[in-house]
Amino acid sequence: MLKPEILDPQGQAVQRALPRLGFDGISDVRQGKRFELEVDGPVDEAALARIHDLAESFLANTVIEDFTIRVEEVAEAAK
Amino acid sequence: MLKPEILDPQGQAVQRALPRLGFDGISDVRQGKRFELEVDGPVDEAALARIHDLAESFLANTVIEDFTIRVEEVAEAAK
């Protein structure tokens, strides 16, 4: 996501459009990117550290963007 | 996120670049969008239902995209 101090014109455009579309009560909208990585093997400390590096160096532009990493289990059946 | 059956060239490009950049063990990358909405008042069932409608009708293109909604508390101090 863009850092809080960085202007987000896309998010603002969405926010301004909402009352017109009948949706009130949303005080702020910010738009960002999301990457889903599928990891081979266990997602242990080492894997998470590598993914943190990867996100920091290639996926996010850390001059203007923050990022968070979240681990989600994939159901065995869906693999 | 793009539905699993929809081709994601951006994600594929990232995935193909990773080994070259020294990151192995990532079997799939998909790229999507993320919106952070700040809601006035309590995020109750009714508010969530409205946000679901909003996401379905305006934020996502449900022909090619899936979406999930997640509620996050904002720390009082950060408000």
Image (tube, coloured by chain):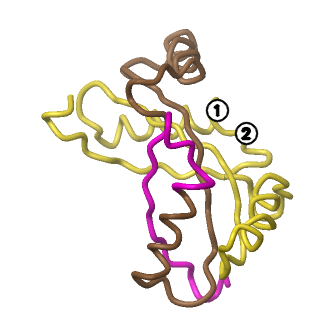
Chain colours: A brown, B yellow
| Residue beneath the point at 75% across and 59% down | B14
Measured along the vertical axis of the image, is residue B37 above or below residue B19? Answer: above
* B67 relative to A7 in the view: left or right: right
For label 2, the SS is: loop
Q: Where does residue B21 sit, x and y in percent of width and height?
A: 71, 67
Q: Quadrant of residue B57?
A: top right
Dots 1, 2 in contact, CB < 8 A: no
Left or right placement of residue A12 versus residue B64 in this view: left
Disc 1 is placed on an element classified as helix
Q: Magenta span: helix, strand or loop, mainly?
A: loop
Instruction: Assess disc 1: are there few (<14), some (14-19) or many (≥20) residues with their C-alpha within 10 Å of its C-alpha.
Output: few
Please state which amino acid type lies under the numbered disc 1: Ser
Q: Is residue A57 magenta-colored?
A: yes
Q: Viewer-proximal residue, B72 or B58?
A: B72
In this figure, which residue is indicated by the disc labeled 1?
B57
What crowding class fits label 2: few (fewer than 14 Cα within 10 Å), some (14-19), or many (20 or more)?
A: some
Quadrant showing the C terminus of chain B: top left
Instruction: Tell how many labels.
Output: 2
Q: Residue at x 69, y 53 (%)?
A: B31
Which image quarter: residue A44? bottom left
Q: Give the residue displayed 45% in from the left and 61% down from the top.
A: A69
> Which region shows up in magenta?
A56-79
| Labels 1 and 2 share a subunit | yes
Q: Is residue B53 magenta?
A: no
**Residue marked by disc 2:** B61
x and y percentages locating residue A58 in the rendered image = 63, 54
Q: Position of residue A23 (x, y in %)?
A: 48, 20
Question: Which amino acid does the dot numbered 2 rest on?
Answer: Asn
Question: In screen coordinates, is B18 left or right of A7?
Answer: right
